[in-house]
Amino acid sequence: MHAVKHEYINFDDYLTGERDVDVRSEYVDGQIYAMSGASELHNTVSAELFGAILGKTPLECRAWQSDMKVVIRHSSKNFAYYPDIMVACGENTDDAYTRSNPILIVEVLSPSTKRTDLGEKFENYTRIPTLREYVIVSQDTPHLQIFRRRCNWKVEYYYSGDTFTLESVGLEMTVDTIYRRVRKEVGLD
């Protein structure tokens, strides 16, 4: 992410303005960061996992890929991110463009997002009271990291050949299934 402005931006103004933009941006405590486009690998891995999650998402919940913002209000600081995949259940107390009550957030890791996804976003996502699981998926290698609230956010690692479970939506699948359409690109042949 790259900052596009260095002056403080009001959070509500950001949320209103973000509804009708050509380039999406994320909000980090008064600063706006433009988002770059995702690679073919990133989108393929994300789509494969999203399809599996969507098929298991309970009817009282909804799943989104990339274009729904999660809003985090912590103390006097505000944050808004576009997770690669998000599942939320129950009433939406926000507007039609944001959610603040996800049970599952997935980020597909790329070299440019690694520091943010495992640092700042991890810290902010795990402050969301409803969040049960935060998942990091590598776009380049068959590797998954799952952080669960019930395990005090300690990481669980999964690799090629492993089966994992997303408890929040009741999904069990193999790591290799996520990468089945990109086998040659990530060296699984």
Image (cartoon, grey):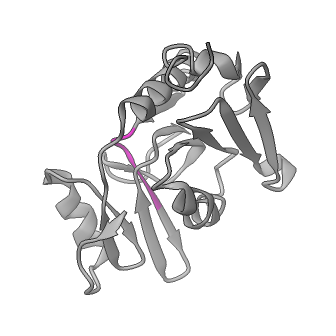
Quarter of image, res 58: top right
What residue appears at the point 83 percent right and 47 percent down from the top-left corner? 150
What residue appears at the point 25 percent right and 87 percent down from the top-left corner? 7
Q: Nearer the viewer, residue 34 or 161?
A: 161
Q: Where is residue 67 in the image (x, y as percent from the top left)?
A: 33, 41
Query: Which residues lie in the magenta part?
Result: 66-71
Left or right of 134 in this view: 153:
right
Left or right of 134 in this view: 77:
left
Left or right of 68 in this view: 48:
right
Q: Of all residues shown, which one is farthest toward the bottom? A: 7
Rendered position, 187 above or below 88: above
Q: Does the magenta stretch include residue 73?
A: no
Quarter of image, res 3: bottom left
What residue appears at the point 40 percent right and 50 percent down from the top-left corner? 82
Q: Of all residues shown, which one is farthest toward the right? A: 151
Split into 4 quadrants, where in the image is the N terminus?
A: bottom left
Q: Where is residue 17 in the image (x, y as percent from the top left)?
A: 18, 63
